[in-house]
Every structure is written in structure tokens, then in C-alpha cells.
Image (cartoon, coloured by chain):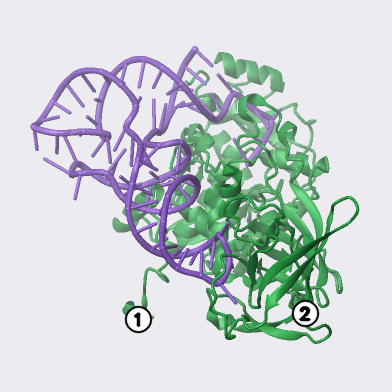
Chain colours: A green, B purple
Amino acid sequence: MSLENITPENAAPVPSDFIRDIVAHHVAEKKYPQIHTRFPPEPNGYLHIGHAKSICLNFGIAREFGGICNLRMDDTNPAKEDIEYVDSIQADVNWLIGGWAEKELGLTTAKAPFYASNYFDQIHEFAVALIKKGKAFVCDMTPEQTDEYRRLGKPSPSRDRSIEENLDLFTRMKNGEFPDGSKVLRAKIVVDAPNIWLRDPLLYRIKHTSHHQTGDKWCIYPMYDFAHCLSDYLEGITHSICTLEFEVHRPLYDWILESLDLPRTLPKQYEFARLSLGYTIMSKRKLMQLVEENLVTGWDDPRMPTISGMRRRGVRPEALRNFAYNIGITKYNGITDVSVLEFAIREDLNKHALRRLAVLRPIKVVIMNYPDGIGEELEATNNPEDPSTGKRLIPFSREIYIEQDDFAEVAPPKFFRLKPGGEVRLKYAYIIQCQKVIKDASGNILELRCTADLTSKTGGATSARKVKGTIHWVSAQYAMDAEVRLYDRLFTEAEPEKDGRDFKSVLNPKSLEVITAKCEPSLNDAKPTERYQFERMAYYSLDKDSAPGKLVFNRTITLKDAWAKEALKG
RNA sequence: UGCCCGAUGGUGUAACGGUAGCACAGCAGACUCUGAAUCUGUUUGUCAUGGUUCAAAUCCAUGUCGGGCAACCA
């Protein structure tokens, strides 16, 4: 692409934040041969939009600075981890940045993804090396005692064991001679350091649990702090970027690496604020609770803030990436307004969704002066934002459906839609006037009798006539039914856990409503990869529950609705 | 309580000692065969008090408020 072809429209946005500033500085001074980051999820749950922020940061930095980013399973606790999560993580990362960062995406290389468990042998050797240096010891205290001693800044009675004895005990730990919890390997740093993480922290614990990658090879597993910095080192990571809660661990991260007298350049840890989103919870543990207690249908329930949930809902990866770009990277713990996410989703879908006509809550309209039996096909635009998507034909007939909300027997002020005696344009078709409202005995509206201005058809003699409102419609004769799932936010409160309240007490009872809609026939060919805008309503995509002859659409997000706001004012 | 970190409109962010800008939201208007999109305009801000300086959102001190950590989780 030549330079003059780069416009603000197509130029890739180049984010700037304090971490990228640091990296840029390192690049400028040639501190490292190549920038190397990593995204290290623990496979104990599904990835959510907070992880998306981290993925975009880590892979983004690699991409922008000509570096590499490893996807690494941080799988040091087999008790909580599962292969299901390993698989879902790969699928989600691939979906989010596949095609955008393939060069940096470990998934396309033979050795990817990476696993911390792959380094268990080497990590074990590092532990032995630390013991030999007199910098680690085997401790016999119970977990409770350990807690208390660390809190009090007291030395463990095992602290001054000989190197030989430590070596022997650690070997026996490894050989499975001791039960879970009976012994641990600890770093020998400072018993009463102001930073708790320097008070002889645990390095290895005994866990007779088989591991999803290493099977029954190990009964001792390294703790996060020990495994993480060493995994970073082994992979040649230069910038180890994590969230704020690890800030206090940084001295330990450095201590371990520095204590080992390692030959290569050491990685450095940097911290940023994790994402908090309004009307959302982000804890994997709590999301799992929603799944396990069947408060949602699964990790990929379209109401979940998980990557798989948002994907199923119809959000495109571009929208998530844009969102991640827009919110920035700082060390400030704020709560991002959901409207920022919603804007990113709408902005993307507006450009890419095919327009279709569908009536969600139908009311029948009979156009009395339109001949029965002879239908006609009208031309409709697929996407005004993208002329290359062309046009399609939609059938028109004497009997149609319109949206209940588009008719008011007693119209409020500024109501531009259909009312008795009033006129509206049917999109792509005629201007109609409401002549009569037919009701049943109890006063429910059964149908509307209208007349059409037969020359007002789009392109026709009086087509230029201005009427205030244009509404969507669908031919009663040719319409097809589809199940439509209307999703709303999962919680009724912006801060579900504010003041320690139980997030389950503020679940939105109306977060899902299922209806049957009347759709234009072309939707019969709806594809799972396609996105649709049902004009004037919302964006939708085909759900995986669809089957031949049974369409199921998920509402991704509504269109902005200025009228709803206006109507509220009364 | 100890240690660490942070604080810029309603929300999220930029300004790296030199004109406080951007996005979302809000409001007002234009346009509209989507009350969408688009376009125009616009309300609102440097936590406080001192200090350094010709000049402070930025540097220093103190205070206030908020967050994190104190798991044989990551």
C-alpha cells in the first residue's frame, strides 16, 4: 500500500499508554534484540472481556514493535484446571486476534500453545539449585502455622536445616513419600520483611493430583510465583505484563530470577489495571457459579461477559479489539461504562450488518385498495454503509404485518408513526393511511384497515411526497417465523457487588425474552457468519441452536432509540 | 494494622514544566424512505493545602479519599 492510500479511515490505530511508552523506550535504546510478551491464562475457566483487554495489550505490543507474544497456559494447579478450558482458551484467542496478529500468535506455530507444565522439569531443577545455594528450605509446618508465623514475622523452625537435609526432603517430596500439606518448599528471604511476599514465600507444595498435561508424573507442583517468572525466563520474555494485584509480587519475581544467577537477560514485570465494566462481574469464580447454578445456560450464554458468550451473541472480534483500544491502559482502577462497549459493538455492526425487515411483535394491516392475490417484489438495500453488498427483492402483498409499537390509537406528541387517519411510509413500498381499527369484543386490536397511495411506491410518481414517518413491515403471506432471543444486561445494577451485596441478588429477571418474529423470506438463507440488522430494531445473528427450517436469532444489541427517550419525557 | 499503588468533566483516557484535548454518555439543532447512521454546536474537569519555579495536572511535602496484597489460588 502506498503512503497516500493511508487515510484516517484505514490507518491502523496506534495506541499509546505508559507500558507502550516503556517498550518504545527499550526499543529505541535497543535494550533487547526483540520484544517478547506473553498472555498467560490459567485454564480454570473461560476467557472474558477483561482477558480480551490483556490479549490486545500483549499481542498488540508484539505486533506494534515487531515482537512475539506467546499464549501460555499457566497450569500449575491441576486441582482447578481442565482440558476443556485449555481448548476454549485457544479457540477464544484465535477468534479474537486470528488474522490480526497471526505472526505473533503462538497458535500458528508448532510449539504453541505454551504450557508452564512443560517446564516442570526445569523449574524443579531451579528449585534444587536454590536449595544448593542455601536459598530455599523444606518446611514442616501446617498451613495454619505457616500463615501465623508469616503474619507474625517469625522464622520457621525448619528454616536452618542443612542443605543436605533439604535436598533429601525435597527429593522425597517429589517421590511421593509425604501426604498433601505435610511439607512445602520455601524460599529463604527475610522472615519479617515489610512485604509479605518476601517472608519466606512458598515455592512448591505437595498435591497428589494428576495433571491434564503431565498426568501422574508429578505430585509436587510449583506455586505461581516460582513458576511464572521462570516460565517467562525460559521463553525469553522481555516484558511480563500482568494486572495490578501482582504489583506486590514483583520483588519476589525479581528475587527468584536474580538468586539463580541466570546467564540470559531477565524478564521484567509491569502491571496495569484490570478491566471493570458496569453491569458486569468479571471474576472467573463467580462466572462459574452462574454456570454451575444454571443461572445462565453455559459459559457461552450470550449474556455472559465471556469471549465465547459475546461471540455467540453476535459481537465481532473487531468490535472487541476496538473497545480494548478505546479504554486505554493505566494503573487506575475505574469502572468503564458499558456504553463504551455498546458503542464499539454498534459502530462495527453498523458497517457490517446486512439490513433486513422483520416484525417482532406483529399487528396485521390490510391494505384495502391493494389487489388481492397479485404480489410484487420490491427492491431493498442490503447495507447503505456498504454499497458492494447490493440489493435484494422483498415480496409485498395486500396483507402485511407492522410493529405494534409503530401504531398508536391515541398518539402521544411527536409520534411520527401510524395512527387513525394518519399516514406513514412503508419502507421501500407505499405510503399508507390508517382508515379503521378492528377490535375484538374485549377491545384488543385485531387488525388495521388502511389504504395505500398507489403511486407513492419508491421510485413512483408521488414517491417524493414527504411523510414524517417510515416504518418496517413484512408480507403476511410470505413472512416466515423465527425464534428471536432478546437479551438484556445480566444485572440490574451497574455495580452488582457494591457494598458487599451478593451479585445473585441483583440478577436481571428480564435478561432474556424469547419471542416469535415475522421475517422477510430472504432470512431463510441466513448464515451463522453473517450479521443482520432488523431495520429500526436491533442487530441479530443466527444462534447455533438453529436447524434447517428452524431459525433462531440472538439479539446482539439494539439500535439507539431516540424515540424511546422522547416518549419517556411524555 | 503493615506494605504497595492510584487520584484530570457523569464515565474512561491524553497532555512527559509552557494554550487542559479526545472518546463515550448527556443536551440542542441539521439531515433522514432506519426516530439508526451521518453532520453541527454545546454543558461539565486537574482531590486538598503548602512549597519549588517566570511558569505546575505534571516536581516536592503533608493530608484526604479510593484500590490491592497479607491463599499450600493465579
* Image location of residue A114, percent across then percent down: 62, 57
Q: Secondary structure at mark 1?
A: loop
Q: Nearer the viewer, mark 1 or mark 2?
A: 2
- Residue A357 drawn above or below residue A209: below
Mark 1 and mark 2 on one chain? yes
Q: Which mark is residue A22?
A: none
Q: Amino acid at mark 1?
A: Ser
A477 or A27: nearer the viewer = A477
A156 or A351: nearer the viewer = A351
Q: Amino acid at mark 2?
A: Ser
Tell me which corner region of the image, top left, top right, bottom left or bottom right, holds residue A313: bottom right
Is A293 left or right of A90, judged from the image as shown? right
- Label 2 neighbour load within 10 Å: few <14, some 14-19, many 20+: many
Q: Which mark is residue A2?
A: 1
Of the 4 image quadrants, the one containing the C terminus of chain A is top right
Is B2 left or right of A451, judged from the image as shown? left
Is A504 left or right of B63, judged from the image as shown? right
* Image location of residue A93, percent across then percent down: 62, 59
Q: Residue at x 57, y 38 (%)?
A: A225
* Image location of residue A101, percent across then percent down: 52, 66
Answer yes or no: is residue A461 visible. Answer: yes
**Residue position marked by numbered label 2 in the rendering:** A397
Label located before the other in sequence (1 or 2): 1
Tell me which corner region of the image, top left, top right, bottom left or bottom right, holds residue A152: top right
Chain letter behind tag 2:
A
Q: Residue at x 78, y 51 (%)?
A: A513
